Amino acid sequence: MNTDINLNRMWEGCLQNDRKQQEALYRALAPKMLAVCMRYANDKDEAQDILQEGFIKMFNNVHKYRGDGNLEGWIRRIMVHTAISRYRKLKPMVLVEDMAEEGAMSSAAQNANNLEVNDLMKLIQQLPQAYRSVFNMYAVEGYSHQEIGNKLGITELLSRTTLYRARNILKGKLSKLTSREQYYMAG
């Protein structure tokens, strides 16, 4: 409750173009929004670029928030849209038919049934950009295939196909992780 009051106070300051309140809002939400941006970026530096661009868009459009929903959710959506539009400009969507294995997994024993969120995020980060974007939009953000197609400029069928392939890649990586775990536990 106290956090909501603080966010509302910061937001009121942002509406007045108060730089201190803008900085306070940035500091309060940047860690959460960086986590959102990391799902779409290739590395942390790229995620930070998306984060900065997203906050600039948000501060330039504070008047567009009508207060209908959660403020944090509105800002999160801006971050997702910023990441998506960044990749639409920089990289055309191309399906990768043949996945090369990207680095060896950690040799530390891990429990696939109790997989840490960070471990799962690392596996998702290993997906090619097109797969990662579609997977995140569908599985994490809750977009429909039609919405994904519209946002990324691809067909609904291509969105479905990309998601199917992304899931298969992740299943394969999880399977390898599980078999390594069994190997290390047996030894």
Image (cartoon, helix red, strand yellow):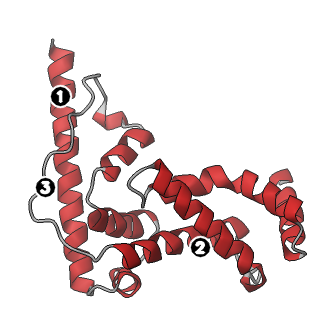
Callout 3 amino acid: Met
Secondary structure beneath label 1: helix
Secondary structure beneath label 2: helix
Callout 2 amino acid: Ile
Residue at 24% x, 76% y: name it.
Answer: 160
Decide which of 155, 30 is in the foreground and name it. 30
Find residue 19 and report its horizontal and vertical position in percent: 86, 64
Find residue 7 and report its horizontal and vertical position in percent: 82, 60
**Image-quadrant location for residue 59:** bottom right
Q: Which residue is mark 2?
A: 78
Decide which of 61, 109 is in the foreground and name it. 61
Decide which of 16, 75 is in the foreground and name it. 16
| Alpha carbon distance from label 1 to label 3 | 20 Å
Decide which of 34, 160 is in the foreground and name it. 34
Q: Which residue is mark 3?
A: 99
Disc nearer the start of the sequence (1/3): 3
Find residue 126 and report its horizontal and vertical position in percent: 28, 50
Per the rendering, the mark at residue 41 is: none
Callout 1 amino acid: Arg
Secondary structure beneath label 3: loop
